[in-house]
Image (cartoon, rainbow, N blue to C red):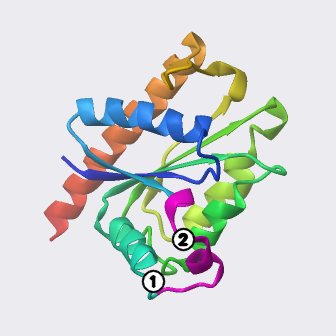
């Protein structure tokens, strides 16, 4: 099965976005995918802000993007757009870092006023990076993500169903895309 890079663009160590991604990673693993998590906040700030493409952590992140067949991009919505931390990484990647890849954009936020942030802010960037297929994304309200004292995430029932559908659609699209690309080789 295809390899999926699961990227959290949240700057917070206690991020609901990152917890949601790790929760959804388990569903992808259960479907037979190899999932590699990448929390952008763990990359050195100096290297990200200084555009140090030679830094080993930045070079490794670029290698992870290159090796993955699919990419899940998760971000909290700040100021009606994806996080600046995520932007700093995307800006350092090669122009067509997503060429031939299936991409699932996800966002979290406190208000439904930001529900279109995926479509008007994130999707155009992913498209400009050459993504072969950007599947339907999903915005999840913060109130639908409850973190217990032990760090366990509970997703509200309706949100969990919707997220399950988009993850399953991503998985199916990813499998189709990799089959077509393998046949073309």
Q: Residue furthest front?
A: 149
Residue 116 at x, y percent in the picture = 75, 43
In the rendered view, would you say 158 is above or below 24? above
Res 137 visible: no
Position of 4 relative to 167 (above/below): below
Label 2 close to label 1 by CB (< 8 Å): yes
Count neighbours of disc 1 (C-alpha within 10 A) and say few if under 14, some if 14 to 19, many if 20 or more: some
Looking at the rendered structure, the secondary structure element under dot 2 is loop
Inspect the magenta stretch and tell me whether residue 9 lies in it.
no
Q: Secondary structure at mark 1?
A: loop
* Whether residue 127 is situated above or below residue 161 in the rendered picture: below
* Residue at mark 1: 55
The residue where tag 2 is placed is 44
- Work out how far the residue at label 2 is from the one at label 1, CA to CA, in angstroms: 9 Å
Mark 2 burial class by Cα count in 10 Å: few <14, some 14-19, many 20+: some
Residue 160 in view, yes or no: yes
Locate residue 171 relative to residue 78 in the image: left or right.
left
Q: Is residue 167 left or right of residue 14?
A: left
For image coordinates 34% across by 29% down, the residue present is: 27
First along the sequence among labels 2 and 1: 2
Instruction: Give the quarter of the image for residue 82.
Output: bottom right
What's the magenta region? 40-53
Where residue 159 appears, as percent x and y from the top left, is: 58, 20
Q: Position of residue 42 (x, y in %)?
A: 51, 60
The part of the image, by quadrant, that contains residue 91 is bottom right
Q: Is residue 42 magenta?
A: yes
Residue 10, how many percent across, how many down? 62, 50
When the figure is inspected, residue 145 is found, relative to residue 126, above or below; the finding is above
């Amino acid at each position: 099965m295809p390899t999926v890079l699961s990227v959290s663009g949240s700057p917070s160590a206690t991020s609901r976005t990152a917890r949601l991604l790790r929760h959804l990673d388990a569903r992808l693993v259960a479907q037979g995918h190899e999932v590699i998590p990448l929390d952008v906040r763990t990359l050195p700030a100096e290297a990200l802000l200084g555009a140090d493409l030679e830094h080993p952590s930045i070079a490794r992140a670029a290698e992870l993007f290159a090796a993955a067949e699919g990419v899940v991009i998760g971000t909290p919505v700040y100021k009606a757009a994806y996080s600046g931390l995520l932007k700093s990484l995307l800006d350092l990647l090669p122009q067509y870092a997503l060429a031939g890849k299936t991409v699932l954009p996800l966002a979290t936020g406190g208000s439904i006023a930001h529900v279109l942030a995926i479509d008007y802010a994130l999707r155009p960037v992913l498209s400009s990076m050459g993504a072969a297929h950007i599947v339907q994304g999903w915005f999840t309200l913060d109130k639908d993500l409850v973190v217990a004292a032990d760090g366990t995430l509970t997703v509200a029932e309706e949100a969990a169903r919707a997220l399950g559908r988009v993850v399953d659609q991503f998985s199916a699209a990813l499998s189709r895309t990799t089959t077509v690309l393998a046949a073309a080789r």
